[in-house]
Every structure is written in C-alpha cells, then in structure tokens.
Image (cartoon, coloured by chain):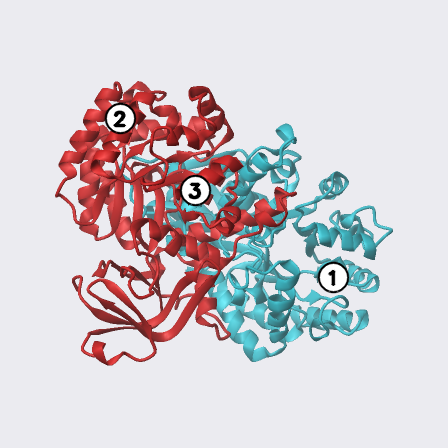
Chain colours: A red, B cyan
Amino acid sequence: MGKSSYVLKGNVCYSKDQNTIVTYENQYLICVDGISMGVFEKIPDIYTGLKVVDYTDKLIIPGLSDLHTHAPQYAFRGLGMDHELLQWLELKTFPEEAKYADIEYAQKAYEIFADDMKTGATTRAAIFATIHVDSTILLMDLLEKTGIRAYVGKVNMDRNAPEYLLETDAEQSIQNTLRWLERCEGRYERIHPIITPRFIPTCTDELMSRLSEIQQQYQLPMQSHLSENQGEIAWVHELCPQAEFYGDAYERTGMFGGDVPTIMAHCVSSEEAEIQRMKERGVYVAHCPQSNSNLSSGIAPVYHYLEQGMNVGLGSDIAGGSSFSILRAMTDAIQVSKLRWRLQSGEGETQKPLTAAQAFYMGTKGGGSFFGKVGSFEAGYEFDAVVLDDSNLRHPQPLSVAERLERLLYLANETHVIHKYVSGESIF
Amino acid sequence: MGKSSYVLKGNVCYSKDQNTIVTYENQYLICVDGISMGVFEKIPDIYTGLKVVDYTDKLIIPGLSDLHTHAPQYAFRGLGMDHELLQWLELKTFPEEAKYADIEYAQKAYEIFADDMKTGATTRAAIFATIHVDSTILLMDLLEKTGIRAYVGKVNMDRNAPEYLLETDAEQSIQNTLRWLERCEGRYERIHPIITPRFIPTCTDELMSRLSEIQQQYQLPMQSHLSENQGEIAWVHELCPQAEFYGDAYERTGMFGGDVPTIMAHCVSSEEAEIQRMKERGVYVAHCPQSNSNLSSGIAPVYHYLEQGMNVGLGSDIAGGSSFSILRAMTDAIQVSKLRWRLQSGEGETQKPLTAAQAFYMGTKGGGSFFGKVGSFEAGYEFDAVVLDDSNLRHPQPLSVAERLERLLYLANETHVIHKYVSGESIF
C-alpha cells in the first residue's frame, strides 16, 4: 500500500488535549492521500469506495514521537549502567561513538538500529548521529528506506572530549557540517538534517556562532542537551560566565527557539528563569525519564511544564535510556513523577503526578507537533498510525478500550506492535 | 523430562555473593535428581552417561523468586494507576478481590495467572490469594500443575475493609483458615500454605493472636505488609499504641521472624529500630520497586538493607506493580535506587545506588533463600534454571556473557524466556 487512501477499522484512541484521551470502539478511521479525515461510526458516502483494512478488536493509536535518541548508542543500550555519567561517557559512550569513523562498523550497527526503528511503535524521531559525515549519511539512507520520518543530526564537538572524538577546531567542524548538508540536498523524502551541537561544554563559542549562521542559511531546526545534571550546569556557568543560565548560553548563539524549532533534551534541573525563557520561545522539552534514572540525573518537573502550556514530548535517550519504546517512556514518566511528588515535597500543587492521559499526550500529540500536524487522528493530521494487538494479555473481566490502552502503556513490548503507517505509507 | 538427571550446555550465570556474578561461557551445568552439581568446563567422567541438552549461545540463569505478589490482582494489572492508594483500593482492589467469592470467575482469572506464571522466568513465589477458601484451593491446584513452587496464602481480614470483603469476625476468619489448611493437607507436592494476615489495619488483635497459634501448630511461614507508606504507619500507631513501631505490632503477635520464616513486603519507610529488629529476627524484605512508584509510596533503602546483611528479595507486587517480571524488578530496583541517591541527600555512604550484581542477587539467591537452597547453581542447590534467548537483541560488537546478562536485565520480556526448570523438573 503506498501513500494512498484507505479505511482502517478498529478501536481508535487519540489525545484530544493533554487531559483527554478519546476512544472509539470498532469504528472507521479514514486516510486520504496520507491525511486523516477523522473517525466515523459508519463510513461516509464519499469514502465508501476506499479499501477497508479490518483491525477489529485491535487498538489503533497515533504514531509515537521520540524527541531524543542517539543512534550510535543503540549498540550498547543496557550496558555499563553501573557507571556514573562521566565514567559512562569515558568508558562506553565516547569509545563506542569513535567506532563510527569506520563505515563498515557503522553499516552493521545502523542496520540494526534502522530495522528496530521500522518495527517499533515510533513513527517520528529526532536523532543524534556522531561527528562523522559518511556514517551520518549512511544512517539517513538506512532510515529513509524504513519509511519512518526523522530529523538526523551530524554531531558537532570541538572541545572537552577525548581527542579521538573531537573535530580539530570550529573551522573543521563547520566544513564537515557544510559537506554533510550538501550531500543531504535532494537526497531524502522522509529524513531531514537538524543542527546538532552536542551541548555547550563540547562546542566553542566560535563553533556555536558559525552553526547559527548555517542554521539561518539552511533554515534548519536544532537539537541539543540542557540542564541534565548539576555538575553540567555548574560547568556551563564556568564556560559561559556571561550567560544568565544554561539555556541563555544557547540563546546567545541565536539558537534557542523563536524562529528556530528547537528541542532541548532533559531539562531536569532548569531554574525558573530558564523555564520561562523556554516557554516564551516555544522550545521543546524532550523528557527522558528512563535516562534520567539510569544516569542518576533526577526527575524533571514535567507536570509543571505541561501546566505552563509548554511544548513537551518524550525521548528514549538511547543509551542513557535502555528501552527505545515510547510506550515504556510514558509509564516511566508517570512513575518518576509520582516519586518526585513523594520525595521532593514542599512544591504544593505545581508538581502533581502525571496522569496516563498526560503521558500519552506527550508521546503522541505533544511531541508529534514538532514534526507538523502529527500525533492525532483529528481531521487534517498526517496519518501516522500504530496497530496494537493485546490479545495475549488475557483478562477474565470485560475491559473498555480506554482500559486496554492504559494497560498497554504499562505492559506492551515490541511484539504487540503489528502494523504501522507513517504519513499514510504502510511500513509493515 | 521428569525430575531426573541431565546436563545443560550453555552460558551459565549466577550470583556468588551480592557483589559478584560469575559467568561460564558454553560450559556444562549438571543436574542430578533435581540438585545442581555445579558448572564444569568438561563433563566429569561420572556424569558422561547423562543426556546433554544443548543451549549453546543461550544464557542459563537461576530461577527467579517473586517474594510478594497478589494473584487475584493479576486481572487488573496496569489499570486504574492514576488513582492514589486508598482510592485504588476502594475502586479497584477490593471490588475485584470480592469477585473471587465466585468460583467460576476465580477459575477464569486464576487460569490466566497460572499460565503466565508457568511461562515466565519466576520459579518460586510467595503469593497472596483472597479471603475465600474455595478459590484459594483452586489457585493452589492450578499452580501445582504448572510445576512452579510457591507459598500461597488465604488472606485474613476482619476489620477496616468494605463489608463485602471482610470475614465477619476473628472466629470466622480462624475457622476459614483451619478449613483451608485441612484441605491443603497431603494435597500438594509443590505448593504450600503460608499464614497471610493482610496487614495490621485489617486484622484485630484477637485474629492475629489466634493466627499465631495456628502458625505454631502447623509450623507455617508467614507473609504480610510493612511500612509501605506514611499514612499506613500512622494508622498502625493509632491501632496499636503499645507497639514501639509498626513491625513490633507483628512481633507482639509472635509472628515476625525468629522461628517463623517471615516475608514483609515493602519496608519503604521503616525506622532504624524496625530495621534492626528485622535484621535480628531474619525477616525477609520483599522489595517491590515498581509498586512503590506506581502507588507513590517512595523508595525503600535497599542498599542499606543489603549492606546490613539482611535478607532481601524482590517482589512484583501485582497489581501495585504492573509487570510480573522479576528481571524488570531488578532494573526497576537499580533505577529507583539511583533516584533515591540523587533526591534523598544527606544520607552519605549508606544509600548508594544498587549495582546490577546486587539486583541480580536479590532476584535469585537473595529471595531464593526463603525457599531453601534456591537461586544459585553452586553444588547442592535445588535445580531451578531459566534459559534465555537474546538472539533478537542484535549487536554489531562482540559482547561477553556478563554484558549480555546485564543487557537482558534491562531489555528482556517474556518472549526471551524459552525454557524453565524447577527443582529439576522441566516446566516448558
């Protein structure tokens, strides 16, 4: 099935807003030219000629968006997790990322990542590659073939990392970036480049300012890390004493929301001024609860972000996070929000636990909006759909569609994902 | 294959002690009459006649022990998790448990639970049923057929719950218990009864003291809940003003370790005097990290318990916990321990994050010791083994057996469990 028009019959679920999941029992979800026409109890006359795909009793949910993940780290997810952050970067992350200078290794590793991205529930992603141009292009080529849609960033780093993983200076980093962007041009339908300075500590002021020029010239979005842990925040204060707060160091480069669609991963320990700046400038928070636990970073105040009406989505942050499932990220987000509520007392009403509706919203419509009209089945949305079969989760009592959805957030694994559509294309 | 003698060839992993996992690459694990003879590089001459089952390249780990779970709650795991504890008990738990007065409903529900226990990685469990004698016997019958080994408790409750789920008084509760124990006698090879007062708030002093007499008479182990959350602890102080602390209220009944093998679930907020008493009396802590997150209870100081040399195992606590996988419980335990370390500061060295070795120990040898010599492949241990196939977790780089084991703790689901042996019996 190409990017054509068809009807899916099944139990359709999506977020109306961050507090409301709507469910339709065995109704008709209509796709015309890759766009959702909405959900109907009976197929309207104008669509009766369309092919009907029967997913009766299955659940159909919007495609999930992963706002933050590192493709080269997929190879070592779930490994070395007893190390603390800096040890883990030195012993695992940096040596592993250096391997991607070797295109043959990259081929082996990225094929596995792309295969799993294809068959998982994620339809949109914002992905870090490495500093290497050739293997970044290879990753984009492989992802293009899967049918998912993603932003992929060649990483920039010109300081504060082992020499074997640094670009020699800002000039070389910029030349690499331009070479990468030239090779991207006209090459992809589904995959797009995104400016990706690793984070302030690994990028000189010169590099950041020249990346900002490239961002303007090519009109690209931007992704990076922000306020993940206290040591990092203190380090940024040292490196950029003129910045009011960590996020301000990005804004001073011209890349922190506003006209620049921006994702900042983590925001675990953002101070209130930083939060307000992110809100004003529409910066997306990629909340990565599993990574923030694995690396002892803490618990981001996500309930507060949602209450403020900020842009918030979920990220797997492979390999800080071990699981690349955004369904798992939803329940991880709920669970850590409850621990925050219990353990970080004195915050009153601003830090209540997240609900299932809020978590589902972040993984679909909330994060999806970074990619356009994505993450819902309301009329006019791009048609990203995931079909879930929960028949092996047997139950003695009747369950509503809403109950089955909540249960799947807690219990689903990749075997429950049986079909996927992205922007109308049938992926598997 | 019955409870016979054989050799398994594969990658064998087990805990030597709480800080050490030993691994053997494609070696021979020998079972004679249901007892492990240990792991050998070559099959010793005296065993060369035994059948060899070839699990080359698979991982073989000891059977996992679930020290705390509620069988009747399996039907609604992952449901209603947005409720807080008391609401959840009222709206979900109590109405659902009341259904087990109906033996036909119990049959449907417990069949599903028993089927999943059979094919999961758990080989030993301590299980709460409900107050109902007939359905508790039914659960035990179904579990006996699976081949796993478990303690199952008919629950006692004679106060502070909805009338539809209470026994009318201590006398009726005791008569029910005696009737249940009579029916158990001589009926089971693998399943055994365990005294199971739900917790102090739902059991009168009279009920507790008469349960203690039954415990003595029948020489049974005992399981209950302890110090799960602050409201509950305050309630126990009101109900038992003479008790020094919550655990002391159990000890005053005669059932709190010592000669009485005892499991206390949770121990999230145990004060130091309670901890020392548990240690002195060898009480087992069933650490249930997912439940303690889902119900906003907090994070138990498990690193401290292990450092003290206390008896600690893991519990799924279905349906407070949503997942019944003890592999998942291991990584949940690690992750929440890191959040405790980060968020409950000022505790210094007594509250470090758990390591993978400690978590694996709790789920195997630590919890297993409640059931005898269980949870290891050292010579003399009962032969509980789980065979894991991680071939769908592809990787571009070589991985050691230890690395593959760590990765499975984070990524395994039920589809990775391909064979199971309990006390020498092949289960599937």
Q: Position of residue B394 (x, y in %)?
A: 29, 44
Does B384 appear above or below B134? above
Residue tagged 1: B218
Q: Amino acid at mark 2?
A: Arg
User: Regarding mark 2 in the picture, which secondary structure is present there?
Assistant: helix
Q: Position of residue B131 (x, y in %)?
A: 68, 70
Q: Chain of mark 2?
A: A
Residue tagged 3: A280
Does B129 appear above or below A283? below
Q: Chain of mark 1?
A: B
Q: Position of residue B138 (x, y in %)?
A: 58, 72
Extreme residue toward the right, this view: B242
Same chain for the residues under marks 3 and 1 in the image: no
Q: Label 3: few (<14), some or many (≥20) within 10 Å?
A: few
Residue B367 appears in the figure: no
Does A383 appear above or below A29? above
Label disc, if present, on residue A217 of the rendered structure: none
Label 3, label 1: how far apart the Cα atoms are: 69 Å
Q: Residue at x 41, y 63 (%)?
A: A16
- Give the camera-side residue of B384 and A303: A303
- Give the camera-side residue of B89 and A298: A298
Residue tagged 2: A210
Q: Residue at x 59, y 38 (%)?
A: B340
- 3 and 1 marks in contact (CB < 8 Å): no
Tell me the quarter of the image containing the N terminus of chain B: bottom left
Q: Amino acid at mark 3?
A: Glu
Q: Label 2: few (<14), some or many (≥20) within 10 Å?
A: some
Tell me the quarter of the image containing the C terminus of chain B: bottom left
Q: Residue at x 55, y 36 (%)?
A: B18
User: Regarding mark 3 in the picture, which secondary structure is present there?
Assistant: helix
